[in-house]
Image (cartoon, grey):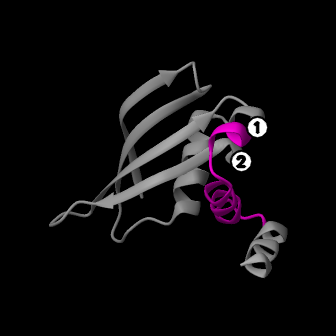
Amino acid sequence: MEIKIVSERENPLLGRKEIWIVVRSKETPKRSDIVTRLAAELGVDKNLIIVDKIKTVAGTSDAEVYVKVYEDEEHLQKIEPRHKIEKSRVVSGDAENEGEAKSEA
């Protein structure tokens, strides 16, 4: 899987970076893979990354991905809907939260 940052915008009002990336992969990339790779590349905590959209490009092996990287947990909790945070936490490999999220559903 190859990741290329296409656009990066600082949003100080919301305390986050908004990033558009292109992921080249043989199949639609998993959210967990994107979070892990992006966290390593940007040097941020996995729990501060929200993968908002994954859109595959027809006829290619590319996917356009919209990602939000928050400065801290406080901004993330105030702005993002609870279901997106839970989805992101499950994706980031936290097995305890995964079990809780499934039992609440």
Classify residue 97 by image quadrant: bottom right
Q: Is residue 37 above or below residue 41?
A: below
Quarter containing the N terminus = bottom left
Q: Could you tell me which secondary element the residue under label 1 belongs to? A: helix
Identified at 53% across, 40% down, the residue is: 68
Image spot of residue 36 (x, y percent): 61, 53
The residues bearing labels 2 and 1 have C-alpha atoms spaced at a distance of 8 Å
Image spot of residue 12 (x, y percent): 57, 18
Quarter containing the C terminus = bottom right
Q: Residue furthest left?
A: 59
Q: Is residue 32 left or right of residue 102?
A: left
Q: Is residue 6 left or right of residue 94?
A: left
Q: Magenta includes 77?
A: yes
Tell me whether circle 2 and circle 1 mark residues in contact (CB < 8 Å): yes
Q: Is residue 82 left or right of residue 96?
A: left
* Disc marking residue 99: none
- The kind of residue tagged 1 is Glu
Label 2 crowd bin: few (<14), some (14–19), many (20+), radius 10 Å: many
The residue range painted magenta reads 76-94
State the residue in front, 7 or 80.
Answer: 80
Q: Magenta includes 74?
A: no
Q: Could you tell me which secondary element the residue under label 2 belongs to? A: helix
Reading the image, the residue beneath label 1 is 73
Image spot of residue 48 (x, y percent): 68, 42
Reading the image, the residue beneath label 2 is 47
